[in-house]
Image (tube, helix red, strand yellow):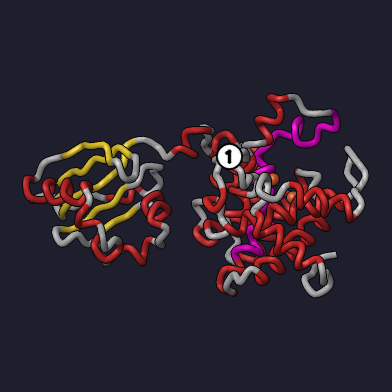
Amino acid sequence: MFQTPDYTILDHLAEICEVVDFNFRYLYVNDAAAEHEQTPKDEMLGQTILELHPNIETTPIFSRLKECMNERKSIEFEDKLSKRKIKIEPVPEGALIHSIGLPAHKTKVKINRKTVPAIINNGYLQRSIRDQSKVLEIEGWLDALDLRTKETNEHILRVTDATVALAKMAGVPDSEIVHIRRGALLHDIGKTGIPDTILLKSDTLTAEEWEVIRKHPVYAYDLFYPIEYLRSCLPIPYSHHEKWDGTGYPQGLKGEQIPLSARLFAVIDVWDRLSSDCVYRKAWPHEKIMEYIQEQSGFHFDPQVVDLFFQANKNPAKFGLR
Ligand SMILES: [Fe+2]
Ligand SMILES: [Fe+2]
């Protein structure tokens, strides 16, 4: 008799792992699979592959899956559609489908939680992780950010209000607004993983030091991905430095590949930064900022978001903008 394997050891693997029964019904999916399918795990479980992907029957992956089921043999192949190496193996209940190798954004910057000792060693975070209340936990993250970075609370609160206002104008449904609010509040949470010597340096940063700073969105990803309710707010902390023309980081996403909330936030973050004095320069006058934002339309920023931002500025009080 076969013993049912314990698939939970696959839970946190970066490779996608899915187990289906002989009727192609999902029996197990790991975090990476749920992320890839953009469907919560509990929604996937109990559904069949055909229900989730109505057109899958005509794809090579499905014929390989049937082959594995019928002949009870392992099959490894390069899936042209998803550009991934995939292995399908027989298991007692059906088949295990898994990708081989990590998705691109995981291989570009090699990070594991050991590389962010500042986060793990921070007493505030340890306390907040244990806390049951999400609000208290978010406050805990903000405290940590406040302790370690020069980011002011005023900046954080202003960009949050303004991003939420712009998101509502853009027609983002209320159910999404909560994630946008959290994402904006915690947009630079990844900076808690940057060493103080770089984060608090008052001189100009070297090219190498900039490289380290540029890792903060990926630190945010590593930090929040395992926490289910914070995973939904990741588009802003992870993608707020992407640029419309594809020259941003960490993934170099282009155009609408960038999540809408991150595109909205990017305009607001730059606008607020330029509106305030900082160690390097005085605040810019309003006209100059608006000119700059217009200039960057189609380069740094999504042109439609820029239009929306200008519309909002016609009635700043109504939209929570200064
Ligand atoms: Fe940032
Ligand atoms: Fe910011």
Residue 11 x %, y %: 37, 49
Q: Residue at x 86, y 53 (%)?
A: 275
Viewer-side residue, 94 vs 168: 168
Q: Answer few, some or many: residues within 10 Å of disc 1's Cα (few below 14, many 20 plus, some between 14 and 19).
A: some
Residue 279 x %, y %: 89, 40
Q: Quadrant of the C terminus?
A: bottom right
Q: Residue at x 32, y 37 (%)?
A: 100
Element carrying mark 1: loop
Q: Determine whether 41 is above or below 117 in the image.
A: below
Q: Left or right: 172 with respect to 141?
A: left
Residue 264 x %, y %: 66, 58
Q: Determine whether 163 is above or below 12 in the image.
A: below
Q: Main secondary structure of the magenta part?
A: helix
- The residue that label 1 is drawn on is 250
Magenta residue check for 196? yes
Residue range corresponding to the magenta coloring: 179-203
Q: Residue at x 53, y 35 (%)?
A: 111
User: Which amino acid, by three-letter code, is at mark 1?
Assistant: Pro
